Amino acid sequence: EDKYTKQAADFRNDLPDNYKELEAAQSLKKDILDAPKKEPTRWERKCKRIFGAAGNSANLFKTGFMMGGLVGGTFGGILGLYQAVQFRRPIIVFQSIIGSGVSFGFFMGLGMTIRSGEM
């Protein structure tokens, strides 16, 4: 037994208690990553066919919808606030925000998807 083996053994004994748990967790993670890949289920294949075929178009639509929703919601809030004061019905603000945000978001999402030219 050389001095390096003895130092390594001493080092292992000086480690904190949870080191052994961390080491076990890392080996479990390695086992999971090294496990053979299972065949995708029917549902996973369908989802990949439906959503994967679009490529980046789904993300473009989502981004356009979020941008349009923010712009439409802002303008809907301004116009809704004006109408709520005019007609003395505060619920108009929320209806206007949601309606304008969803409709403008939808068209902005479509526009962004068409503009990308991926289809």
Image (cartoon, rainbow, N blue to C red):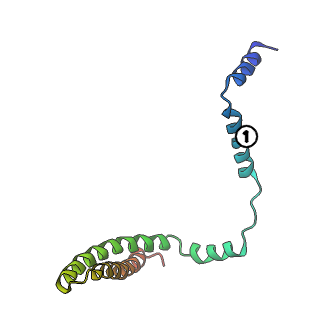
Q: How many marks?
A: 1
Q: Is residue 51 left or right of residue 92?
A: right
Whole-percent x, y for residue 98 in the image = 35, 79
Q: Which residue is mark 1?
A: 24
Residue placed furthest toward the top: 3
Q: For the point 59% across and 78% down, which residue is it? A: 50
> Residue 18 sits in which quadrant?
top right
The structure residue drawn at horizontal position 44% and vertical position 74%, both measured from the top left corner, is 61
Residue 59 horizontal/vertical position (percent): 47, 70
Tell me where residue 10 appears, x and y as whole percent: 72, 19
Q: Give the residue at x 75% y 67%.
A: 39
Apparent side of residue 96 relative to residue 39 in the rendered image (left or right): left
Q: Amino acid at mark 1?
A: Ala
- Residue occupying the far bottom of the picture: 87
At a point 49% along the width and 73% down the height, the residue shown is: 58
Q: Which one is in front, 18 or 11? A: 18
**In the picture provided, is 66 more to the left or to the right than 119?**
left
Label 1 Cα crowd, 10 Å radius (few <14 / some 14-19 / many 20+) = few
Which of the 4 image quadrants contains residue 11?
A: top right
Q: Residue furthest left?
A: 86
Secondary structure at badge 1 equals: helix
Residue 98 vs residue 41, the one in the foreground: 98
Image height check: is 39 above or below 100? above
Q: Position of residue 100 (x, y in %)?
A: 32, 81
Quadrant of the drawing holding the N terminus = top right
Q: Residue furthest right?
A: 1
Quarter assignment of residue 25: top right
